[in-house]
Amino acid sequence: MDSPAGNPGLGVMIRRLATPSAKRELQAGATLFRQGDDVREMFVVGSGKLRLQRHTVEGVRLTLQTARAGDLLAEASLFASNYHCDAVADEDCSVNAIARQPILDALTARPELARAVIAALCGQVIDLRTRLELRGIRSARQRVWQYLSLSAGPDRRIATPEPLKHMAEAVGLTPETLYRTLASLQREGVISRTPDMIRIMRRDPT
Amino acid sequence: MDSPAGNPGLGVMIRRLATPSAKRELQAGATLFRQGDDVREMFVVGSGKLRLQRHTVEGVRLTLQTARAGDLLAEASLFASNYHCDAVADEDCSVNAIARQPILDALTARPELARAVIAALCGQVIDLRTRLELRGIRSARQRVWQYLSLSAGPDRRIATPEPLKHMAEAVGLTPETLYRTLASLQREGVISRTPDMIRIMRRDPT
DNA sequence: CGTCCGCTTGACTCAGATCAAACTTGGTGG
DNA sequence: CCACCAAGTTTGATCTGAGTCAAGCGGACG
């Protein structure tokens, strides 16, 4: 539930608009743009992984989107004058920059492209609403449960290649609380865990 | 920060796609569609006010969007097979229903319409991200402060025509906690209040 | 071999939820 | 004009559960 609703062709279609010179390489941890910067272009990820993030007044980091190869980045800022989040490279990566105007032109000239962008944005809206609902759940147990249910595939498994810390951030809990909550769910047989996998055993967290 | 980024012409443009017979009247409290229903159409609000809402597992109500005259409703579900929230009338209202296919056709046929829809969706994404950040703030005091700052106009005032209860829901606090927090901010001269207006007096909640 | 980082668990604290009671306000109807 | 009711607001008392601080474990990596 993290990257724009996948139209695999979208990135490719848009990348064609990029001038070859617009390719940029980023080292892990580098910043592509910052909240408040003027919006001049948007981006298509060529390889690697970037995060759109903000920090709350309290300093808590909030990841708004993760973009991988083929994904669009900053499309929501197309009509804004300033970026409203930071974009930082999670790994070494390369991105193609595309100036705003060529994109706007292409959107009017090529309906199928516009349609793909609309579909991607719709997916994002739905995703964000889901996350908002998640954050509205007060109880850590219920919240974790809901998160797991949403993340699980039809086989009721969730792969956890990343540190649980990151899941804690996504769920909106401190790592300690997440560890405890998972431990408690496991103790009661609601889930089972291996180092890189969580499996939901019962439908109801009780 | 509640209705789709306002392109005033959008609703009008789209309404022209509606067949006259598609007009529906709703009494306050009536439901237009429910989470899980098949998506067959989207809507343009003619008059009155509707809310898109969900309920968390804990029963807390979450308002995802408020749509007023001229606003689009359910546009994020254009490409989905089921609605993902309930739409209920806040007041008596009338809406125009427009079937999905005519809209999709119009989007490809009329670039300026597609562009307006994209702009509206971008606005929603930005708005939702802002709200997500708000919910990420743990301290009630900071959260209320941020909410007020975001809601205030350039004159640093916030009109509060609706019951504070609703603000509590928007901020994600219980009414009691919101009342107390506002009282405390007021006591310390950070804000001042009249029955239907809040004014920010200092920039820093401390 | 040592250090860093993620993980785990324990103990404590405190802010916000919850329950409860009183008081304002507006509207309705007798 | 007033009795009455409903809904919102306010304040108090109490409780609980998530945050915080702290300590120990283990694996990865230089």
Image: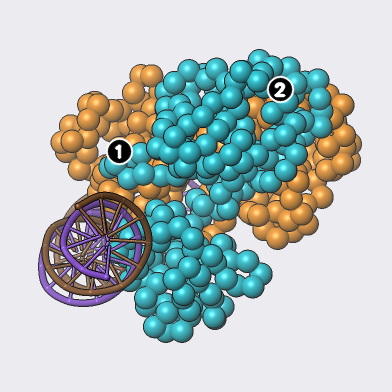
Chain colours: A orange, B cyan, C brown, D purple
Residue at 65% across / 54% down in the picture? Answer: A84
Q: Chain letter of disc 2?
A: B
Q: Is residue A117 left or right of residue A124?
A: right
Say which quarter of the image contains residue B105: top right
Say which quarter of the image contains residue B111: top right
SS at circle 2: loop
- Name the mark on residue B197: none
Residue at 60% across / 72% down in the picture? Answer: B156
Q: Are marks 1 and 2 in contact (CB under 8 Å)?
A: no
Q: Position of residue A34 (x, y in %)?
A: 69, 57
Q: Position of residue B19 (x, y in %)?
A: 66, 18
* Gap in angstroms between the C-alphas marked 1 and 2: 38 Å
Say which quarter of the image contains residue A70: top right
Residue A129 seen in this snapshot: no
SS at circle 1: loop
Q: Position of residue C3 (x, y in %)?
A: 43, 63
Q: Which residue is mark 1?
A: B57
- Residue B160 lies, with reference to residue A88, above or below; the image says below
Amino acid type, label 1: Val
Label 1 or label 2, whichever comes before in sequence order: 2
Q: Position of residue B30 (x, y in %)?
A: 41, 32
Crowding around mark 2 (Cα neighbors within 10 Å: few <14, some 14 to 19, many 20+) is: some
Q: Which residue is mark 2?
A: B17
Amino acid type, label 2: Leu
Residue B134 seen in this snapshot: yes
